[in-house]
């Protein structure tokens, strides 16, 4: 009996199968195209399953599947299970079926998996369509040689919804202090009573402005997230707040376009030489995006150390898998800069977008959420 899977689950599975079938991956350019000059051979992929760790060794014709467990030391201990040998072309065929499903199924985020694909998944004992790991990697890859150090990756597929780079919920809120004319309680209630809509945050900000109020950056709501942002730059929270404000008021969401606008208004009041010759604002934003891609989380103390995630495997609209790795730092940073956008989180859930009183002062919170663009 066929079962349903989300497009995101199938996107991860497609990437996994494509790598096994091809035995290599092309590095991506900042413009999300293949770098024809750079292609890394893959010797083995390690993936977590419901019953332990699996290693998929890429051989000439077959994929050799070995089950086992990974010790705390990182050592892989082979389980007392028979190895499987599956033709590589079978993985290629399964990948093509998934790609066709992703390309042709519009609208719904869930897809009914055909029996042929379900049978293949059963044959190779894959039951977790999205690997469940503690270190936030989707799977790990050994390049060039099976005994090479493993490289952890996150998968993002443009043919499905994508997990955001930053989705901290209410932890990722920034506080703007309401100054100017002092609002009476009925005025505050009037602002907060504006009806729910996709533009309710914008409408409230504009209403505050019309009523003579001024929203000025004050602080980061969460202590840990504040410190994490300060690790990028002592003034970075203010820069980020201005970008989020601009996203709501001007309707610009791409990070690269917002950064260009930030350069024009120069909220940090820094010298032109620093802005134009040194590229201060772009540099700080790229630092931040790289930190997010490599493990920074709003609620977890960030000390500059990278996590187990070393890169992103991106499936583009044509189904090509492109590799972005921290060893190619400049390309990775440029890719993130050109292909990320600010997004709007749910207002009620993330507790932002309305006036609230703290210690006799009214604040208006904005939420930071950053995701990859679809094109």
Image (tube, rainbow, N blue to C red):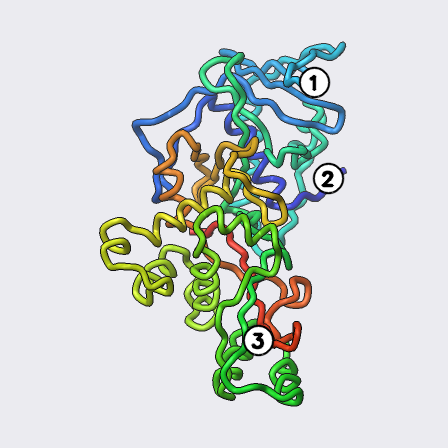
**How far is the residue under mark 1 from the one under mark 3?**
50 Å
Query: Is 164 on the left-hand or right-hand side of 69?
Result: left
Q: Is residue 342 above or below residue 360?
A: above
> Which mark is first along the chain, 3 or 2?
2
Q: Nearer the viewer, mark 1 or mark 3?
A: 1
Residue at 76 percent of width and 24 percent of height: 51
x%, y% of residue 345? 59, 61
Task: Kindly report the distance in space between the C-alpha atoms of the residues bearing marks 1 and 2.
Answer: 36 Å
Q: Does any portion of residue 96 appear in the rendered image?
A: no
Q: Which of 359 and 54 lies nearest the eye of the viewer?
A: 359
Q: Residue 18: percent from the left, percent from the top?
A: 51, 29
Please state the horizontal and vertical placement of residue 142, each as a whole percent of the image.
Answer: 51, 20
Callout 2 crowding tier (Cα within 10 Å): few <14, some 14–19, many ≥20: few
Horizontal side, residue 368 vs residue 35: left or right: right
Q: Compare marks 1 and 2 and give the one earlier in the sequence.
A: 2
Residue 131 tag number: none
| Location of mark 3 (residue) | 200
Q: Is residue 340 above or below residue 314?
A: below
Labels 1 and 3 touching (C-beta < 8 A): no
Circle 2 SS class: loop
Cα–Cα gap, marks 2 and 3: 42 Å
Q: Nearer the viewer, residue 242 or 177?
A: 177
Query: Residue 368 location in percent, x, y?
Result: 54, 58
Query: Looking at the image, is mark 1 or mark 3 earlier in the sequence?
Result: 1
Left-right relation of 10 to 67: left
Would you identify the image quadrant in which residue 258 lies?
bottom left
For the residues carrying marks 2 and 3, which lies nearer the camera in this image?
Answer: 3
Under tag 3, what secondary structure? helix
> What residue is shown with label 2?
2
Q: Are marks 2 and 3 in contact (CB under 8 Å)?
A: no
Front residue of 11/96: it is: 11
Residue bearing the label numbered 1: 71
């Amino acid at each position: 009996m066929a079962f349903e899977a989300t497009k995101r689950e199938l996107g991860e599975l497609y990437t996994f199968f494509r790598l096994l079938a091809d035995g290599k991956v092309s590095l991506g350019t900042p413009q999300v195209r293949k770098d024809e000059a750079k292609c890394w051979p893959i010797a083995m992929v390690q993936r977590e399953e419901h019953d332990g760790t699996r290693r998929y060794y890429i051989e000439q014709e077959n994929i050799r599947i070995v089950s086992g467990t990974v010790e705390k030391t990182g050592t892989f201990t082979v389980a007392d299970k028979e190895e499987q040998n599956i033709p590589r072309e079978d993985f290629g065929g399964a990948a093509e079926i998934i790609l066709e499903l992703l390309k042709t199924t519009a609208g719904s985020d869930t897809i009914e998996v055909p029996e042929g694909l379900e049978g293949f998944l059963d044959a190779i004992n894959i039951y977790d369509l999205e690997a469940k790991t503690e270190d936030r990697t989707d799977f790990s890859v050994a390049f060039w040689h099976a005994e090479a150090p493993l490289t952890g990756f996150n998968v993002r597929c443009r043919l499905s919804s994508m997990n955001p780079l930053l989705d901290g919920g209410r932890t990722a809120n920034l506080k703007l202090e309401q100054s100017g004319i002092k609002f009476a309680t009925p005025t505050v209630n009037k602002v907060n009573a504006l009806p729910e809509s996709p533009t309710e945050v914008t409408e409230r900000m504009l209403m505050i402005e019309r009523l003579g109020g001024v929203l000025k950056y004050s602080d980061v709501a969460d202590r840990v997230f504040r410190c994490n942002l300060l690790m990028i730059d002592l003034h970075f929270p203010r820069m980020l707040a201005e970008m989020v404000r601009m996203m709501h008021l001007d309707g610009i969401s791409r990070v690269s376009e917002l950064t260009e606008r930030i350069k024009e208004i120069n909220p940090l009041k820094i010298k032109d030489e620093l802005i134009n010759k040194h590229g201060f604002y772009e540099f700080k934003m790229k630092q931040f995006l790289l930190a997010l891609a490599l493990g920074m989380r709003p609620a977890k103390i960030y000390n500059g150390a990278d996590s187990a995630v070393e890169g992103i495997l991106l499936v583009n609209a044509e189904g090509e898998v492109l590799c972005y790795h921290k060893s190619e730092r400049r390309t990775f940073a440029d890719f993130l800069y050109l292909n990320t956008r600010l997004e709007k989180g749910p207002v009620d859930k993330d507790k932002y977008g309305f006036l609230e009183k703290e210690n006799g002062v009214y604040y208006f919170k904005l939420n930071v959420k950053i995701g990859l663009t679809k094109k």
